[in-house]
Amino acid sequence: MTKISLISPVDGSVYAERPVLSLTAAQEAAARARAAQGAWAAQPLEARIATVMAGIDALEALGGRIVPELAWQMGRPVRYGGEFGGVRERAAYMAQIAAQALADDVIEESARFTRLLAREPQGVVFVIAPWNYPFLTAINTIVPALIAGNTVVLKHASQTLLAGERLAGAFHSAGVPADVFQNIVLDHAGTEALIRKRAFDFVNFTGSVGGGRAIEQAAAGTFAAVGLELGGKDPGYVRADADLDAAVDGLMDGAMFNAGQCCCGIERIYVHESLFEDFVEKAVAWVRGQRLGNPLDPETTMGPMAHARFAAVVRAQIAEAVAAGARALIDPAEFPADDGGAYLAPQILVDVTHDMAVMREESFGPVVGIMPVKDDAEAITLMNDCAYGLTASIWTQDAAQARAIGAQVQTGTVMMNRCDYVDPALCWTGCKDTGRGAALSILGYHALTRAKSYHLKKA
């Protein structure tokens, strides 16, 4: 029997192992989800909302267990207390807008005609969740999918096997039927085979560009809807009128939090030349204030990356940039916990160019390149000189100018004076190699339902 092993970044040990479900067993799970969907969708909307939110309560009650598990599974320090604030915020908002988002759009109600647009659940939703925010990213789809009347099959990343079990356990304890929400363990081949067999009506994937291509290829010809959130190389731009201290604090936290392993983390920064030297000096001081170490230690602010192979990619990008003329401003010796493996010292690079991979390709680690720019036009050109488009962060006192700049940036979300945040009232989306689709907001419900038209002639 094939097993998936979860190697902890804390000490390299096998933290958990689970058997891989056979394709036959996985098909049976999907069939149970399909059989259960009608009865679940027939429940009143208010009942589904109450049950789902009770599941969120049950998940929060597991916090004392989940927080250290997250540290062991993917390295996030226990001092940050898990993901429960964001989980609650997103779930509560999606519950709040459900009635509006799912309501009939009545075009005509007269003696002769009823004409309306209705929303119906897609059916069976397959959620393929990532390890970096294993609860938040999964909740983005699980909560509105269940509320909208879909059944859900969750396949979590191998690095966070236990997260899927905790989610399923919490929702089941709150009254979500076992076949309505299922957590299964699959390898890549089994995942793709199940999609090819048209087991699902909607597939949501968060992960790499390569993974997204594999999902799209597997879904080709099945006509299942697909939502993809893939790579990112999110930029920050500091204009001449920015609050410098706020920009440093915000952007460096956005670059380094979670060891840089954030979907919308800041991976490159462009600073107006008048502020460049001061920004870099303050950024270096900010990084030197971090403490790299065991994530189970409450004093640790930066844990290991989730796997040594992820850290190896970042080290290679840094080495390539330095060989091409970049300057590394942090001596790794300042962070003695850097072990050449999963524990990686944070790094700031200057004298970087867009010929370097670290400024064009996703790093997903604690490194950021900083470049001076002479004006907005140069910043816009550089922000767009990338294959990805998830978020962009603009630091300025001029909201009108931020809007004008944002209109020219190829991205899914524009932020002003903040970064690395997902607003559940706004659509979470991207462009270019970041993928396609919509999560959260009313548009998230539209993705998880299909339109159905009624034209009823009465006389």
Image: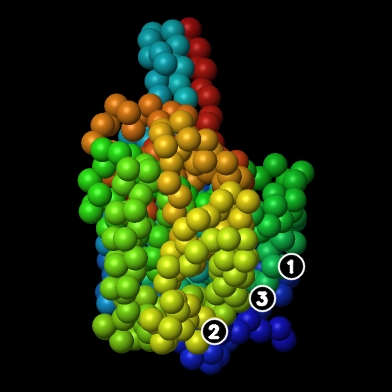
Q: Look at the image and tell me whether residue 63 can be seen.
A: no
CA distance for labels 2 and 3? 35 Å
x 50%, y 64%: residue: 327
Residue at the disc numbered 3: 21
Dot placed on the residue nearer the N-terminal end, 2 or 1? 1
Residue at the disc numbered 1: 189
Element at label 2: loop
Instruction: State the image coordinates of residue 304 (x, y, percent, origin top left).
Output: 45, 79
Numbered mark located on residue 340 in the image: 2
Kind of residue sitting beneath label 2: Gly
Locate the N terminus by quadrant: bottom right
Instruction: State the image coordinates of residue 76 (x, y, percent, origin top left).
Output: 39, 75
Determine which quarter of the picture holds residue 437.
Answer: top right
x 34%, y 69%: residue: 287
Kind of residue sitting beneath label 1: Ala
Task: Name the front one of labels 1 and 3.
Answer: 1
Kind of residue sitting beneath label 3: Leu
